[in-house]
Structures are given as structure tokens and as C-alpha cells.
């Protein structure tokens, strides 16, 4: 009996203790929360500048000292080589499993081969979640990562919060890697959030437009808002409408979009019907006109309608003529609802889209006016 | 202790077969369907499934017409002894190869998502050891094991799929009915591969206590698997769309990487998914292993299959390690599903059923005269 117990003890000890042979303590690891990728500022060089941002955990273990941000940059030809080489400078294991954000510099984004390589590196890696956010920096990604957020000092966490809030307030598509990759696979065209540093402050606004895996142009925040309306992704958006020299903020609360195809007379025509509902948030203290008057609301409605329609047409014109990129989803609409038409147009879509006849039918409604009349 | 007569019920065999089938198809089915048929993959599952049900009923007919008879004895009774030997040897080879590749894929997935630094040899070997343990306990244990595993596997999987729904885009299921008949026929081997494991009915049919009642449970099992696959396929498409699904090696596992629970409660659910994946793979590997041991015991004339459990292990292990990488594994596996599997799963059973049917007819007519 004793022997049996002894054997059991030995077996249990061997099998449990053996698991510790290659353990890594948590403070011997650093968690890379943000990665920036820039073009190396060396002429005729294939190399890229990779910037890694991670919190220093050692100080956290010490207690009161607070967590410190570490930002390290290193030149390299590919992400994983550089990550490995970084162990020549950092005394800890780098772990990318908790990566929150990838920021790509403008110059890299304009290079389609580099972009395809980078995107594949992140898609192929099992450790990296498809929930990671990806954004394009106007200028250098390194500058963005070296700037500290005002409300949260940990770089990765700050970005994560920033993107999450944008999701909640403005609707989806704030650069989730999974969504970006999905769209790129499907259409080769996508928009990613634009990130800039303005006066020592990180600003996440506008969009970078990609076509054929490379950056072709930017949309500013106003244009981006219209884009989210057309893509039915908008949640809350406020536009300033000018009526009788007064500024009226119109807050969009609900959007419905319907695409339809009209190819009766040979010429293909896409009709986009957009129904927008919203509230008036401000008019004037002690106004001369009664805002409760249906006639008045109709008048305001008309102004809102024409303002938004103008903006939408401008955006579509820009996308068609200047960027030549179909990020509003005409292609996806044809592919899914008119597969036969799409089969014919598929080959020549790049040339068809810029000259496509797109009609906008905008229909705005004022639903609420607040507490006063 | 509790083992008595090596008997399982008709329900238990249906459960064993369900789990075996799910394990072979779950990882790659959405990807291959998206490649072959775009958003119309479900049509192919339905067509393949109907074919599967037809086959299952043919198997059921054979098993029912010869209750409590071993597969080899049925074969030698109707197709002569030598043919029976050839067929059984072929089936053994087929089961060994299939099992080898399945366990390789299992190991690769585990290494990719969970045990990054553990040698794949160790992952595969330890899994096979557990399988040996179950095989030595025999069919009865496997039957009970399947009963326990069904809820343990399917309830958490369903919950995980529900969580994945938050990124779903309904439009991804469009356009429908774009696939041509030619493409459907071309894609049938893929679906057939996803239903592999059903041929074990021949081997396990011997142990069913009431073979007459076997039809209903196996039809339910088939329908369940068809529905599960349609669900899986739709979920993947809803999340990824056709093009992205085509680019993923294991869409099902990547799907779970998109799960996020608000409030950061759980973000990377890999560990949970992988533990379910271990169970799913095991419920495929162990029945195949057990079936191989039974057939081998028959062919060498041994009464007990227990002794053969361990000697089979190195064979499966070597087959698993045969391919150099995952791409080669799939290439080899394709060859099997294109040539060996149709012979074993479709042609031989159909011939056998025809012979049995013809003999019965002539036998009855003979009795009348």
C-alpha cells in the first residue's frame, strides 16, 4: 500500500511540476498594445520603421509608481523579423496577443505591395484578434504613438477607448481589422479611420480611402458623416443648417437607405433613396416664429433636405471623379441583388463606376423639436 | 466493472455517428463551400445531405437484414470470402488514413491557437493515447460517452455562435440560386467528406441490441447533421461574406476570434473554443480508432479487439506525421475523398445492398414455388 501511495505521489508531482519548465512570469512579459508602421527615411530602402508601444509592467508591480509608457522604434523589413530583433533591446518577452491598435503611416499606405504584406501578416497570425483597430496616420504613425492621450495615459488603452466611443456615437466601421479585411477581400476597396496629431493632441476624424490596396485619398469629417449615412451606419450625427441666417443644429437619429437599379433605357442608373429622421436641437430664444407651426417645420425641412442633398452629391462626385472608388456599396448592391447585371459589369467596373449615373433621392423628416416652442 | 455485454442502443449508435460526422466537416466545410458555390453553399449541403440520407438508409437496410452479424461475415456471405477480405482490408486502410489526417488537422489547429510551443508530435501522441484508453473499454463505453458529450459540445457551441451573431450582415447570404447543376455535382465530394464517418454504421451495427429499430435514429442523426452544417455555413457567411470565407483555412475557428462581449468580460475566447474543439475531434478520432480495431480483430480472427488498440496507434501516428505541412495534409486528404472514400462509402454498400435485395427476392420466389 505504501508503495502505491509513493508511486502516485511521484507520478502526480512529476506530471504537475514538469509543466513549469518553460513558464514565463507575467512581469517578464510586455504586452504590446499599439504598433505603428512607417516608411524608413532612408532613400532607396526597402525597410520600414516599426514602432511598438507598451506599458512598463515593472513599475506597476512596485505599487504607487504608476504605469509608464514605453515607445520603441526599430527599422526592419517585416513586422515579425523586427519584433524578434527587438529582444536585442528589451529584456522581456514581447507578446502581441493583447494588441489593441495598428497605425499605418501615410507613405506606407500609398504603397500597395507593402500594404498587402502588412495586412496579411496580421490576418495570418492566430494571436491577433480580428477586433484590433486599424487606422491610417496623416503623416507618421510614430508621431501619433509618441503623443499621449489627454484622458488616459496608456497609449493602447487610450486608442481602444477612442475607437469604442466613436463606434457607439457614430456607428460602426471605426476601423475594426476584421471588417476592413472582409471588405478588402470582397471589393479591394475600403475606408479606414484617419488619425492625426494636432497641437500635441490625437485626433481621430475623417477617413482614408483605399482602392486596389493603396491609399488614394482622404475624406474629412463632414464627408465621412455623409458616407456613414449612405452606408446606413450612422447612429447620431449633427449637421448645422442655416435658415434665415440662423444656425439650426439638426441631429440625425435614424437613417434608411434603399438602392435600386434602373436600366430601362440602355443606360444603367443607380437610384439611392435615403430617408433621414432627426431632431432640431436649437433655434432661438424667444423666437419670432412659432416652431410648433407645421408650416414652419416644413420650411426648415426643405432647407435641411437641400443642404444634405448638396453634401451627398458633392461626396458622390468626389468618390466618382476624384477618388474613383466605390465605397458607398454600389458594387455590393449589384453583386447581391442583380447578379446577372453584375456578371456583365464585373470586368469593366473600374471604368464604369466613375461615369455611372447615380441619382440621390433624399427625404428628410423633422421628428422632434425639444421642450420649447 | 459496468461492462457486461458489449451492446449499445439504436439511439447511442446514432449519437456516435452524429459526433463522428460533425468532427470531419466542421472546420473546413464553409471554406470549401464558399469556394465552390459562393453564397449558395446551403443548396449543396441539402443535395449532399439527401444523398447521405439515401445512403444511410441503404446501410440501415443491410444492417437490418443481417442483425447481429459482423460486417465481414455479411460481406463473405454475399460476395465470397476473398472479396470480403479485400474489402475489409481496404476499409481498414481507409479508416487508418482518414483518422491519421483528421488527427493531424486537429493537432495543427491546437498548435496554432492554443499550444504554440508544444511539439505537434506530443499533441497527436497524447490524444491518441486517450483514444487507446477509450478503445480498450469498448463500444459500450463509447456509446455512453457520446450521450454525455452531445450536450457538453452543442450547448456551449450554440452560445458561442449566438455571440458571433452581433457582427452578422444579413445581406451576405445573397445572391441565392446562382449555382449551376454542374457546380452542384462537382461540389458533392466536399459534402460527402463532411458526412464521412457514417460508414461506421456497418461495423457498429453488429453491437446494436435492437437492429430493427435503427432506421429512425439514423435518419434523425443525418437530419441533425445537415441542419448543423447549414447553420454553421450560414453563420460563417453572415460574419465573413463569401470572399473572406474563401481566404480562411478554418473559418469556424476564425469566427470565434470576432466574438466580443461588451464590457470586456471575455474577449479572446480561444481557450473555451479550443476545449470544445478537443472534444469534437476526440469524438471523431475515437470511433474511427475503435472501428479499425474491430475490423482488424475480425480479419486476423481474434475474439478480442482490446489488444489491438495500442498497436494501431503507431500506424495512425505515422500517417498523421506523413505530410510535411497543413497544405500537403489537405492535398492528400482530397485524394482520399475523391477516390478511396466513394468506393468504400458508396459503391461497395450499394453493390452489397443490391445483392442482398436480389437474393431475398429470388429466395422468396423460390419459397413460393
Image: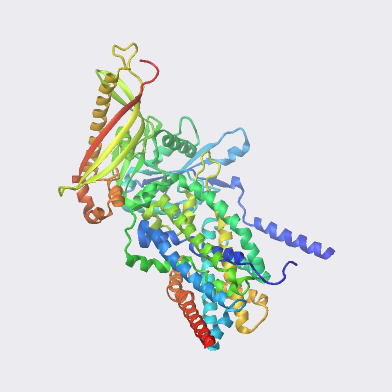
Question: Vertical placement of B251 versus A68: above or below?
Answer: below
What colouring method underlies this structural image? rainbow
Residue B301 lies in quadrant: bottom right
A78 to B348, vertically: above or below: above
Q: Quadrant of residue B205?
A: bottom right
Residue B21: percent from left, percent from top = 52, 65
Q: Residue furthest right?
A: A1
**Apparent side of residue A274 relative to residue B16 in the rendered image (left or right):** left
| Residue toward you, B33 or A264 | A264
Tell how many labels. 0
Q: Quadrant of residue A4?
A: bottom right
Visible residue check, residue A187 = yes
Does B134 appear above or below A249? below
- Outermost residue toward the front in this view: B369
Viewer-proximal residue among B171 and B115: B171
Where in the figure is residue A107, as x and y percent of width and height?
Answer: 32, 45
Which residue occupies the foreground of this view, B18 or B214? B214
Residue A234 in picture, x, y percent from top left? 36, 35
Visible residue check, residue A211: no
Question: In this orientation, which residue lies closer to the viewer: A195 or A367?
Answer: A367
Q: Position of residue B15 (x, y in %)?
A: 58, 63
Q: Is residue A81 above or below residue B286?
A: above
Of the 4 image quadrants, the one containing the N terminus of chain B is bottom right
Residue at 77 percent across and 60 percent down: it is A9
Amino acid at each position: 500500500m505504501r508503495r502505491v501511495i509513493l508511486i502516485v505521489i511521484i507520478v502526480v508531482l512529476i506530471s504537475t511540476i514538469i509543466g513549469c519548465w518553460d513558464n514565463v512570469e507575467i512581469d517578464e512579459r510586455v504586452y504590446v498594445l499599439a504598433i505603428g508602421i512607417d516608411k524608413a527615411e532612408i532613400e532607396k530602402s526597402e525597410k520600414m520603421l516599426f514602432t511598438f508601444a507598451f506599458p512598463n509592467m515593472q513599475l506597476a508591480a512596485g505599487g504607487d509608481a504608476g504605469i509608464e509608457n514605453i515607445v520603441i522604434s526599430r527599422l526592419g523589413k517585416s513586422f515579425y523579423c523586427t519584433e524578434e530583433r527587438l529582444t536585442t533591446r528589451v529584456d522581456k518577452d514581447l507578446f502581441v496577443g493583447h494588441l489593441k491598435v495598428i497605425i499605418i503611416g501615410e507613405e506606407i499606405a500609398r504603397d500597395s505591395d507593402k500594404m498587402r504584406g502588412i495586412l496579411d501578416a496580421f490576418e495570418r497570425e492566430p494571436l491577433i484578434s480580428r477586433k484590433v483597430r486599424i487606422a491610417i496616420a496623416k503623416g507618421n504613425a510614430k508621431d501619433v504613438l509618441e503623443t499621449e492621450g489627454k484622458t488616459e495615459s496608456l497609449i493602447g488603452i487610450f486608442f481602444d477607448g477612442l475607437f469604442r466611443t466613436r463606434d457607439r456615437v457614430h456607428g460602426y466601421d471605426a476601423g475594426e481589422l476584421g471588417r476592413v479585411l472582409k471588405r478588402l477581400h470582397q471589393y479591394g476597396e475600403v475606408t479606414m479611420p484617419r488619425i492625426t496629431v494636432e497641437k500635441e493632441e490625437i485626433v481621430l476624424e475623417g477617413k482614408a480611402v483605399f482602392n486596389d490596396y493603396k491609399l488614394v485619398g482622404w475624406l474629412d469629417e463632414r464627408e465621412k458623416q455623409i458616407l456613414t449615412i449612405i452606408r446606413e451606419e450612422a447612429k447620431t450625427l449633427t449637421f448645422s443648417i442655416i435658415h434665415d441666417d440662423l444656425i439650426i443644429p439638426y441631429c440625425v437619429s435614424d437613417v434608411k437607405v434603399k438602392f435600386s437599379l434602373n436600366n430601362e433605357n440602355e443606360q444603367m442608373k443607380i437610384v439611392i433613396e435615403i430617408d433621414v429622421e432627426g431632431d432640431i436641437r436649437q433655434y432661438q430664444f424667444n423666437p419670432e416664429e412659432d416652431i410648433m407651426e407645421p408650416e414652419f417645420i416644413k420650411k426648415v425641412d426643405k432647407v435641411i433636405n437641400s443642404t444634405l442633398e448638396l453634401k451627398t452629391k458633392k461626396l458622390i462626385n468626389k468618390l466618382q471623379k476624384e477618388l474613383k472608388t466605390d465605397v458607398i456599396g454600389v458594387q455590393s448592391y449589384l453583386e447581391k441583388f442583380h447578379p446577372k447585371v453584375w456578371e456583365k459589369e464585373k470586368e469593366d467596373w473600374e471604368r464604369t463606376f466613375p461615369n455611372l449615373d447615380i441619382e440621390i433621392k433624399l427625404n428628410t423628416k423633422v421628428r422632434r423639436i425639444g421642450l420649447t416652442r | 466493472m459496468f461492462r457486461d455485454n458489449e451492446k449499445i442502443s439504436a439511439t447511442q449508435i446514432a449519437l456516435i455517428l452524429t459526433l463522428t460526422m460533425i468532427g470531419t466537416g466542421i472546420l473546413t466545410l464553409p471554406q470549401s463551400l464558399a469556394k465552390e458555390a459562393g453564397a449558395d453553399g446551403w443548396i449543396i449541403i441539402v443535395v449532399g445531405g439527401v444523398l447521405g440520407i439515401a445512403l444511410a438508409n441503404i446501410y440501415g437496410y443491410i444492417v437490418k437484414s443481417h442483425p447481429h452479424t459482423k460486417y465481414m461475415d455479411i460481406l463473405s456471405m454475399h460476395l465470397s470470402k476473398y472479396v470480403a477480405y479485400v474489402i475489409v482490408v481496404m476499409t481498414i486502410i481507409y479508416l487508418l488514413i482518414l483518422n491519421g489526417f483528421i488527427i493531424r488537422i486537429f493537432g495543427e489547429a491546437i498548435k496554432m491557437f492554443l499550444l504554440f510551443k508544444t511539439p505537434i508530435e506530443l499533441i497527436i501522441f497524447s490524444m491518441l493515447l486517450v483514444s487507446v484508453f477509450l478503445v480498450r473499454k469498448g463500444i459500450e463505453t463509447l456509446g455512453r460517452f457520446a450521450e454525455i458529450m452531445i450536450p457538453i459540445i452543442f450547448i456551449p457551441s450554440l452560445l458561442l455562435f449566438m455571440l458571433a451573431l452581433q457582427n452578422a450582415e444579413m445581406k451576405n447570404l445573397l445572391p441565392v440560386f446562382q449555382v449551376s447543376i454542374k457546380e452542384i455535382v462537382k461540389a458533392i465530394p466536399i459534402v460527402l467528406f463532411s458526412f464521412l464517418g457514417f460508414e461506421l454504421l456497418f461495423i457498429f451495427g453488429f453491437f446494436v441490441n435492437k437492429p430493427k429499430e435503427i432506421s429512425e435514429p439514423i435518419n434523425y442523426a443525418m437530419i441533425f447533421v445537415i441542419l448543423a452544417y447549414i447553420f454553421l455555413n450560414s453563420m460563417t457567411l453572415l460574419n465573413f461574406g463569401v470572399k473572406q470565407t474563401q481566404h480562411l483555412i478554418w473559418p469556424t475557428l476564425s469566427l470565434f476570434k470576432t466574438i466580443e462581449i461588451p464590457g470586456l468580460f471575455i474577449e479572446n475566447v480561444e481557450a473555451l473554443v479550443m476545449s470544445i474543439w478537443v472534444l469534437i475531434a476526440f469524438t471523431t478520432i475515437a470511433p474511427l480508432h475503435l472501428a479499425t480495431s474491430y475490423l482488424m480483430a475480425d480479419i486476423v480472427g481474434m475474439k478480442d479487439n482490446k489488444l489491438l488498440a495500442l498497436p494501431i496507434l503507431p500506424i495512425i501516428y505515422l500517417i498523421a506525421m506523413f505530410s510535411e505541412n497543413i497544405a500537403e495534409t489537405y492535398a492528400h486528404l482530397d485524394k482520399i475523398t475523391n477516390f478511396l472514400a466513394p468506393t468504400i462509402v458508396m459503391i461497395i454498400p450499394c453493390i452489397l445492398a443490391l445483392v442482398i435485395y436480389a437474393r431475398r427476392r429470388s429466395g422468396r420466389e423460390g419459397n413460393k414455388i
